[in-house]
Image: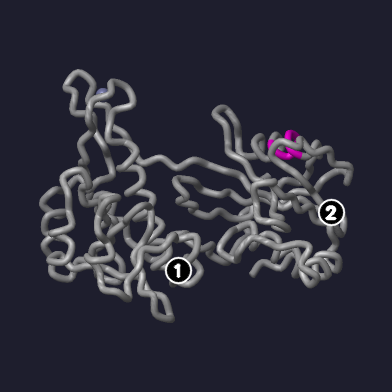
Amino acid sequence: MLSYHSKKTNVFAAGTLQRVSESRVDEQYIQSKLHDPATRFIPVWKNKNLVTAVDPIQSVYLSYDQATPLLTDSAPLIFLGILEGVTYFAFALPDDSPVATLFPAEQHFKDLRDIGVLLTQDEGSLYAYARALVHWHRTHQYCGRCGSKTLSIEGGHVLQCINPNCVLRHFPRTDAAIILLITYREHCLLVRQSIWPEGMYATVAGFLEPGESLENAVAREVMEETGLVLENIQYHSSQPWPFPASIMIGFTAQSTSMDYKLDQVEIEKAVWVTREELAEKLQNGTIKLPPPLSIASRLIDEWYKGGEVS
Ligand SMILES: [Zn+2]
């Protein structure tokens, strides 16, 4: 049985932005917002977002006059919504844009993975939303059914095939991935992949496959990677993860034993730790944990603090 008990909002989860999705079909409304002097524009370049380099890091939004010269036919404007009375649009800059000459020296394009925790909840979620939609536009310029070009409509939230015999409508996609904290009595299981930095451990994660429920995917991933059988699988919380197009759906579960058998393909090592052992290994540097940005970090942190939901 799933139970929602989380109070804290994960980084990148939607803040107070109003998406006003019903207005996306109203071209007159979109155009009026486009030319509203208060409207702001979010550029995305090579999947990176624009921020100030000074401390504290802040998001940078462009005015209509600043954004217009940067727009290209292949990168339409995407209507995001309204935050505190200001309308926001996103757009892509071509990879070969001379960004160093286009923007002031104190502004830089950064990967959201590196700066997400430094932004406010609203800024982080707005940037994640912009990044995800721009990425979807870049990777869906052609129809997956007939190969014709697609056309951005409805404020950039639909890409429609221009072939009159097809006219398939493509919608933004989000790939579901499960991530979970496994415990056995006083122990928590941490795993590592060989491609991760030395000493880095995290929780088990994997993609949902077609035909699976989320609980199916949790049980399958854990069985495949560790051979462990789970019980009491509980939903924890979820996190938009636009790297490039996922949502991480967090769970907790108890293992019926400590006897794991690693697949040695995805998981290189695993270790059961008590809270005291984890503290010691963090102290002596033999274990490093994921950055505080991620839901993996939160799952481990909440377990470490005794299961309190922060
Ligand atoms: Zn088509």
Q: Secondary structure at mark 1?
A: helix
Which quarter of the rendered image does ligand 1 occupy?
top left
- Secondary structure mainly formed by the magenta segment: helix
Residue 310: x and y in percent read 64, 70
Chain-order first, disc 2 or disc 1: 1
Observer-nearest of 268 and 35: 268
Q: Which residues are magenta?
A: 221-225
- Residue sitting at x 64%, y 57%: 296
Q: Is residue 198 magenta?
A: no
Task: Find residue 40 and name its label.
Answer: none
Residue 78: x and y in percent read 25, 51
Q: Is residue 296 left or right of residue 47?
A: right
Number of labels in the image equals 2
The residue tagged 1 is: 121
The residue tagged 2 is: 272
Q: Is residue 136 left or right of residue 310?
A: left
